[in-house]
Image: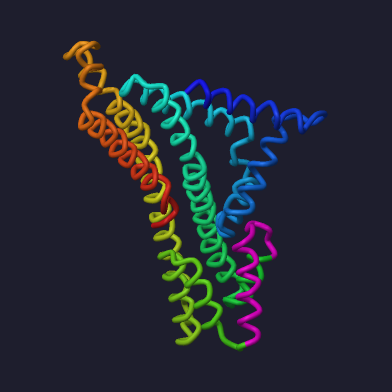
Amino acid sequence: MELVILILIAIFVITYRRNTGDNFYKFLMSEINNIYEKYAPYSFQMVREKTKELGQEYTAKEYVSQVAIFGVVGAGIAYLYFSSIFWAILYAVAAIAFIPYLAYLRCQRIYSEFLFEQIQVYTTNVIMEFNTTQSFVKALEGVHESGVLENPVLDDIKLMIDLSYQNGTIDESIKYFDDKYPYYMVKNMHQLFLQITKEGAKDSGESLENMLLDIDMLVEGVYRDKMDRSAFHKKFITFGFALYLLVMLTQFLLGTENYIKMLDEWYVQILLHLIIIINTYFLITGEKFYNEDTGAE
């Protein structure tokens, strides 16, 4: 174990000396970012870029803090279970390795919430514009020029306008938007506009007012669900980490010396590893549930 620590220190010193004159912290962040840019999926890069634009991406210092916290917690739990520096280091590295995946889940949640807000703005503003213009395409143009929307929704509206003029009908543009943003409020609103356009309904004001009320109720339900998830998430994390500490109860009941003697048995070691792995899977699954589809209806 001492040899492993010496090798790690040597790698650190050599890397630092090779970058004399540069801030090692900046160099390390640059290397990590280069690796990320090389291997991260394009879709995630786009989502992360939007998260940065929204000002909700973690700073480099926050990521370093996460590395330190995850490493210390992982090492602490492993040492508590196995009383071994080897397993402490191994589980610390494993805990740190989860940080990119958790960052991915968080960025997906932020992007999903952003898209939902954009879709809410899109639907309500198109309905209000239509009440004035009595034309779906003119309503799209009004919303596009109003400056209330951002990309990627803004560019997609421009494409809808172009498709409508190109085809002389709104069918293809609506299909494109419905496929890309499969929200109920979008599909219901577009279906209503198709009906108005094709059947030539003269008095659509009441139907559009009811649609606005439906959208408000839907949005209220989504935000209520968001608050409930957030409250449940805090309790879930607390409960999950408490499960790791149940081994302390075992040590208290058996006595520390008896517990350490039990660690000599191979099946006890396997059982303890399984407890950590299963509990970690439980926590990661909960994190995935909390972060996915938060903007869905």
Magenta run includes residue 161: yes
Residue 41, visible in the rendered structure = yes
Residue 44 at what x, y percent from top left? 56, 54
Screen quadrant of the C terminus: bottom left
* Vertical side of 217 occupied by 132: above or below: below
Magenta run includes residue 270: no
Predominant SS along the magenta part = helix
Dividing the picture into quadrants, the one containing residue 15 is top right
Residue 17 at what x, y percent from top left? 76, 28
Residue situated in front as seen by the camera: 69 or 106: 69
Residue 271 at what x, y percent from top left? 23, 33
* Vertical side of 80 occupied by 177: above or below: below
Where does the magenta region start and end? 145-166
- Image mark count: 0
Residue situated in front as seen by the camera: 158 or 209: 158
Report the residue at 63% width, 74% height from top: 159
* Vertical side of 236 occupied by 45: above or below: below
Q: Is residue 161 left or right of residue 256?
A: right
Residue 207, visible in the rendered structure = no
Q: Give the residue furthest to the left.
A: 253
Q: Is residue 121 left or right of residue 189?
A: right
Residue 16 at what x, y percent from top left? 72, 29
Q: Give the residue furthest to the front.
A: 3
Report the residue at 63% width, 30% height from top: 61
Report the residue at 56% width, 59% height from top: 43
- Judging from the image, the colouring scheme is rainbow
